[in-house]
Amino acid sequence: MGNTGMLYLVATPIGNLEDITLRALRVLREADIIAAEDTRQTLKLLNHFEIKNRLVSYYEHNKTEKGNYLIGQLMEGKDVALVSDAGSPGISDPGEELVGMAAEKGINVTMVPGPAAVIAGVVLSGLPSGRFGFEGFLPVNKRVRSKRIQAVKDDTRTLVFYEAPHKLIHTLKDLRSVLGNRRISLARELTKKFEEIWRTTLDEAIDKYEHETPKGEFVLVIEGADEEALERERISSWEELSLTEHVRFYMEEGLDKKAAMKKVSEDRKISKREVYNSLVEKKESSNKKDPAINTTGPHHRV
């Protein structure tokens, strides 16, 4: 294989044009092709910095056709700079698929880092930022959407979603119905003149946007599930089972008996020996109730 070109993932400003990096400007000037999610939006950026370069579209509905074209150009040794509408390409946009295609072909890919709405939203939220789960845009299909939210219901990390203004109220209500009334930070117009970070609750956010039309793209940052409450709920559910039923539950999940007993001891905060002794006592008690089960010699029922 000959020398291939380089695929550059170039982060661009999410609002304030001063956030462009010097390296990003250099790469955009030197690239053979700039692939953009929205060429009209990118053209504004290029014109502002007086960058004249070959611009092609690459977005959700032409990603297969244009993806193959761009891979072909890279294989011929041309350098391609990929940009999204704003922020870091590859996050909640078709750029991730182009990166996958390039990786399969052994094409070099690098990142020109810069603004990312998810990071700005998290650090400005006032919620724990050491661990967070990024969910991007929720699916449009109601059933799939509900399933996705259910999947993160017990996640104790801070949760991050993107949402467009016209879908905001529906998303807030769907999140409230599954997650309960949690704390939320709604960040909009990040880095722009009318930037707003509203730290509130889901109930208050729903009340506001039922009477007010939201404007701008939103980053929704929601507190994770309460770890202590989850633990209390888990303990309560196990208390309804006998030790034998608890062990059987894990064995039906695919664990062998030894592993199941270990899980039960962890769940109930008791030693593995206590679990084992309880099961032995249960078995011996059952055998005593029916002597036919536990005999040492020939035996006939009467």
Image (cartoon, rainbow, N blue to C red):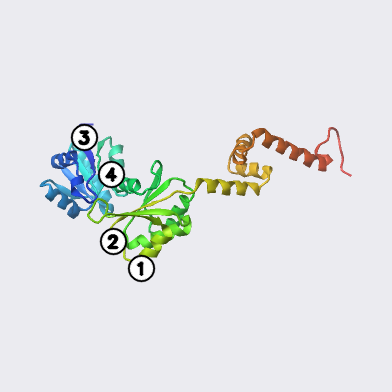
256 left or right, relative to 179:
right
Question: Label 1 vs label 4: CA separation?
Answer: 41 Å
Mark earlier in primary sequence (1, 3): 3
Residue 195 versus residue 10: which sits nearer the camera?
A: 195
Q: Amino acid under label 3?
A: Thr
> Mark 4, residues whose alpha carbon is within 10 Å: few (<14), some, or many (≥20)?
many
Looking at the picture, how far across and down is residue 66, in whole percent?
23, 48
**C-beta proximity under 8 Å, tags 1 and 2:** no
Residue position marked by numbered label 1 in the rendering: 211
Identify the secondary structure beneath mark 4. helix
What is the spatial separation of the Cα atoms under label 2 and label 3, in whole angstroms? 43 Å
Does label 2 or label 4 sit earlier along the sequence?
A: 4
What is the number of the mark on residue 4?
Answer: 3
Where residue 182 sits in the image (x, y, percent)? 45, 54
Tell which of 149 and 294 is nearer to you: 149
Label 4 amino acid?
Leu
What is the x, y in percent for residue 173? Answer: 42, 61
| Quadrant position of residue 279 | top right
Asked if residue 283 shows in the view, the reply is: yes
| Image disc number at residue 98 | 4
- Kindly identify the residue that appears in the image at 42 percent across and 53 percent down: 183
Of badges 1 and 3, the one in the foreground is: 1
In the rendered view, does 195 fall on the left or right side of 170? left
Instruction: Quarter of the image for the N terminus: give it.
Output: top left
Q: Nearer the viewer, residue 211 or 159?
A: 211
Which numbered dot is residue 131? none
| Local crowd size for mark 3, using a 10 Å CA cut-off: few (<14), some (14–19), many (≥20) | some
Report how far apart the C-alphas of labels 4 and 3 lie in the structure: 15 Å
Which residue lies under the disc numbered 2? 215
Upstream in sequence: badge 4 or badge 3: 3
Q: Which sits earlier in the primary sequence, circle 2 or circle 3?
A: 3
Mark 1 vs mark 3, CA separation in Å: 55 Å
